Image: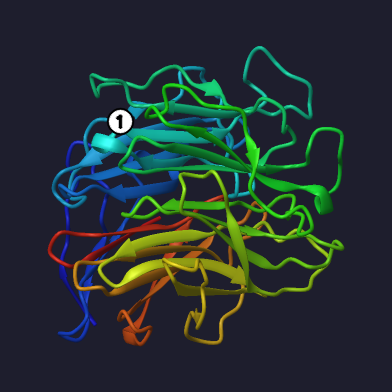
Amino acid sequence: MRPILLLTSGLLAAAAVAVVQSASTRPLVVRQHVPDGGIQPQAVVDERGTVHVIYFRGDPAHGDVFYAKSTDDGVTFSAQIRVNHEAGSAIATGSVRGPHLALGRNHRVHVAWDGSDAVRPKEAPDKTPLLYTRLDDSGTGFEPERNVIQSAFGIDGGTLTADREGHVYVVWHASPPGERGEEHRRAWVARSSDDGKTFGAERAASDPATGACGCCAVGAFTDSRSTGYLLYRSASETVNRDMYLLMSHDAGEHFAGALVHRWKIGACVMSTEAFAEGPSGVYTAWETEGQVYFSRVDQETGRASNAVEAPGSSRGRKHPALAVNRDGDVLFAWTEGTGWNKGGAAAWQIFDGAGHSKGNIGHAESVPVWGLVTAYAMRDGRFAVMY
């Protein structure tokens, strides 16, 4: 591989540090740093090719969320907009509790995050809020954030997704009111059918028998057919930390689930998940035993089979990210060596739609403490990895 282009900064440049090309059958991969020195980026590209990015900045225990966008595939980004109105109301500690981004109808931006101890009025210690906001009608700022939890407190793993029909789903896991313990935790969904203007009371989506890993994230996604997906880690009998994938064909009214991958370990592994969609289908990714995997999802049955693991013998792999380009190729990215209060490296591999690797593994140092990677496909078929 040889570098062929160095991207320069713009208004708020992503500070891309290299563009790497391998064989002619493999798209280019652009390495980018998070705008403004932030961490935990989340990137989504809309149908027009605009890249929307959110990221965290500040004290990991009580920082802020920022939004920027790019119309030139990430060469330059717009001036930042702070998402949260209440300063310091977001948290990044643990890498599983940062902000999440979704695009809904008419490309409206929706954001959710676990509230920090700086949120006022301050609730009881076991009533951490899950805060939600959306870009306002002018597109120049965000509405004041609000807590969507009504009864299922004890949150972790807060996230969200949205579809093109005006539905927004804010998701988290917590024990039902009056219960405690990971074995009782369930995935909860608060739904909106008016583009996030209002939300109904949360409803449990997961099987109560599986529990939910107490400090692991939940993955949420809505595909182009408005089918909803949830991916979460169980905690039954404390040691069964298996991955389950849930699917809904009726705007979140009902979810049906299936086991994806088993892992027996008596610890909370602080894992995250990823989804992406492209012409080759819907894909999801997760971690098991220090390795990361991805799989195509059957959009009719909701089953993820024929899991593909990241190549190489390295372990300590976490926090996967996915992107699919116009040709159906899949970029699979992850972190290596990250842990509690510890940074590490980013790595990635491109696969074709059938799960066969293309070219060599890419690698970059300097993923910061509590950092994650995100990935997106460019209009010309190249990929970007941001960390």
Question: Residue at 44% of width from left, 65% of height from top?
Answer: 365
Can the viewer see residue 256 in this picture?
yes
In which quadrant is the N terminus drawn? bottom left
The image position of residue 67, as x and y in percent, is 34, 34
Check disc 1 and report the residue beneath it. Answer: 80
Query: Left or right: 47 with respect to 169?
Result: left
Q: Is residue 322 above or below residue 291?
A: above
| Coordinates of residue 280 in the picture (x, y in percent) | 29, 73
Q: Quadrant of residue 271?
A: bottom right
Q: Residue most toward the top?
A: 121
Asked whether, in this view, residue 217 is left or right of residue 332, the answer is right
Closer-to-camera residue (219/345): 219
SS category of the residue bearing label 1 = loop
Query: In x, y percent, where is residue 249?
Result: 46, 53
Identify the residue at horizontal 87%, vertical 63% (top origin): 237
- Residue 330 position by quadrant: bottom left
The answer to whether 179 is drawn above or below residue 18 in the figure is: above
Judging depth in this view, the residue of 165 and 66 nearest the camera is 165
45 in relation to 365, above or below: above
* Three-letter code, disc 1: Gln
In this orientation, does residue 317 appear? no
